[in-house]
Amino acid sequence: MKTHLKAIKSILQASAVAVGLLSASSAFALALPTATSCGYPAPNDNLLCYTSETGARLYVGSSHDDFISYSVNALDQYASKFGYTSLSAWSTLPPFGSGQIVKLFSFNNSNNGAFPDATTGTGDNHNPSPSGDQTPKNDGQYYGEWPVGSVVTVAQLKAFLGAGFNTPVFAFDLNNTTLQLNGYLQVRAAGGTTVIDNFGFDNISNSDYDPLSLVTALAAQTVTWYDPLNTSSGCDFGGTGICTMVVDNNVGSGKPDFFAYAPTFDLYDYADTDELYFTMYMNGLVSGGEELALTNVITSPNNVPEPGVLSLLGLGLVGIAFSRRKSREV
């Protein structure tokens, strides 16, 4: 009996360690809030809202085919200006430096450590190149692919994201005033010739990439909502209850303006040897360059512990149940 209890204790200790590692790896991560349809009619039927602690429905982002995109400045203002405590963590973003991002598309060369370098030329000021902008120089457009001449596997992305991250989050730094863009994430079997899945970022909801369907990224937009309980200066407390703010989607170079993720994309649905490919198209480039990166400091709302952690926890629970049965038998 003592031997059995010691074994159970070891299982529980291992489970506790697993939970601790999961908590440690995810503690620094800021989770995107759960968003559902705001209920607006077309053409705004893709807008998504978050329900605050006061019951207010707050615009936080929009759906674009397989992806959901969030406005970082909107989340920041809800927290810092309007005092919504359930979004308070968004008043301060985690760092986005070396080790926290992998740049996919960038203005200049970007070394990503173990990952392939970023595809360059988003400033539209280079001649066409397979490893950069593939459209003519200074045509206001950009088309790029990543990685170029190399491979990125599911296992690599899992390792970068860490435990508890099953759905990667993209960070987009907007530089131009208003931009139109689209793209896709593709999962291919090892070898890169057989396509397993496509995840499109465009405005046609068909789980496919539609190159002619473009998403407009506005540099600024005015947002209104109803919250009679909010006493902030931007709300008409005691009157109509209408709140208003101007969302600045271009907060500065080197800072993310949008976060996006594909809710149905789960890394653990694929083999570790499967390969990942990304494309990005932009139209309306007039100055500077844009950046798209993967980040491990922002997590999607639907992230769960990886299967190995769940299995370990399951073993611990089985051990508890078995211990109780043995205790009753003694």
Image (spheres, rainbow, N blue to C red):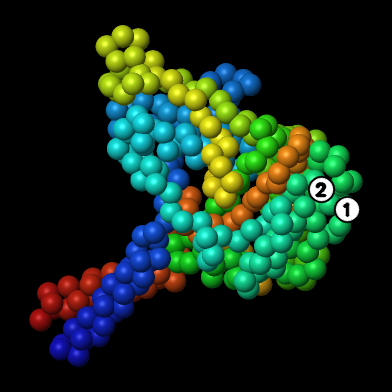
- Quadrant that contains the C terminus: bottom left
Q: Residue furthest bottom?
A: 3
Task: Give the percent coordinates (x, y) of residue 68.
Answer: 57, 41
Q: Quadrant of residue 55?
A: top left
Q: Secondary structure at mark 1?
A: loop
Residue at image x 70%, y 35%?
179
- Quadrant that contains the N terminus: bottom left
Position of 130 with respect to 244 (left or right) is right
Residue at image x 35%, y 19%?
235
Task: Give the percent coordinates (x, y) of residue 150.
Answer: 76, 70
User: The residue under label 1 is which amino acid type?
Assistant: Pro
Q: Residue furthest top?
A: 239
Q: Residues within 10 Å of mark 1 (few under 14, many from 20)?
A: some
Q: Is residue 233 above or below residue 80?
A: above
Residue at image x 59%, y 56%?
294
Position of 7 with respect to 219 (left or right) is left
The numbered disc on residue 125 is: 2
The numbered disc on residue 128 is: 1
User: The residue under label 2 is which amino acid type?
Assistant: Asn
Q: Is residue 275 above or below residue 235?
A: below
Residue 127 appears in the figure: yes
**Along the viewing direction, whichever of 81 and 56 lies nearer the viewer:** 81
